[in-house]
Amino acid sequence: MNKIPIIEIFGPTIQGEGMVAGQKTMFVRTAGCDYSCNWCDSAFTWNHYMQSEIKQMTAIEIYNELKNIGGDCFSHVTITGGNPALLKDLEYFVDLLKENEIKISLETQGSKWQGWMLKIDEITLSPKPPSSGMKLDLDKFDMIINNLSKNNVSIKIVIFNDIDFDFSIEIYRRYKGIPFYLQTGNEYINETNNLILTQKLVEKYTWLIDKAINNEEMKDIKILPQIHTLVWGNKRGV
């Protein structure tokens, strides 16, 4: 069985973002990404400085590590990255979780397609806004949305500024009917004082709420903070 590059496995904790925010879950974070966003809060998954932290693991090894850490305290696993959709061999792990009746969420930017994504219970597609420095391939994103049209899929856009918000309006227009989430971006990833960080994030969340609720076009949306940063700050593994 081929091995999968894993940067960290942790939990149980809560999901802090998107359609399953608040969900008790374990996390499996894969290494590698086809993006390098300006404000990435998980750049350790793809920059060369963290190569020594990557473990090559089989599906069985990942599952055993989940059980070793989480015991019998979980029935939900979130696969995140980096970009897990780069990895064809994740299908073996997905099948193993399904065999053990564990529900699965996936977080990806919607730049790559894998057939195993059809087996995921909850998929969050997070197209990156202009502030990321990345450019969305709309044709590819269309294809992924169409492939997942009968699945439990949502769109989440992280907002840092007015230009990002304008981008989110364009995406909302294009994919009406898909559950749609706006979330505040954390541009303070080096802040170590949690009180200062929380104040800044709440101010940003208030700003985003004001913009969204006064927009006549974006009616059917949910506006979220990044819950885990409000609780634990910029700490990893929570």
Image (cartoon, rainbow, N blue to C red):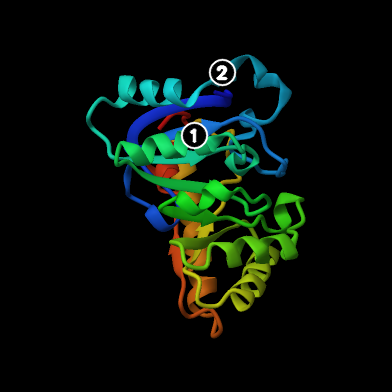
Q: Residue furthest left?
A: 72
Q: Residue furthest front?
A: 1
Image-based side of 130 in relation to 88, left or right: right
Up-down: is 71 above or below 184?
above
- The reply to whether discs 2 and 1 touch (Cβ–Cβ < 8 Å) is no
Q: Amino acid at mark 1?
A: Tyr
Up-down: is 168 above or below 199?
below
Up-down: is 171 above or below 21?
below
Residue plotted at (51% across, 80% down) = 214
**In the rendered image, which residue does mark 2 sit on?**
55
Instruction: Give whichever of 67, 13 is nearer the camera.
Output: 67
Mark 2, secondary structure of its residue = strand
Q: Which mark is residue 92?
A: 1
Residue plotted at (48% across, 40% down) = 79
Residue 232 can be seen in this image: no
Instruction: Give whichever of 156, 138 is nearer the camera.
Output: 138
Image-based side of 58 in relation to 101, left or right: right
Real-space Cα distance between discs 2 and 1? Answer: 17 Å
Q: Residue 179: x and y, percent?
A: 47, 69
Image-based side of 44 in relation to 222, left or right: right
Q: Residue 102: x and y, percent?
A: 32, 41
Q: Quadrant of residue 2?
A: top right
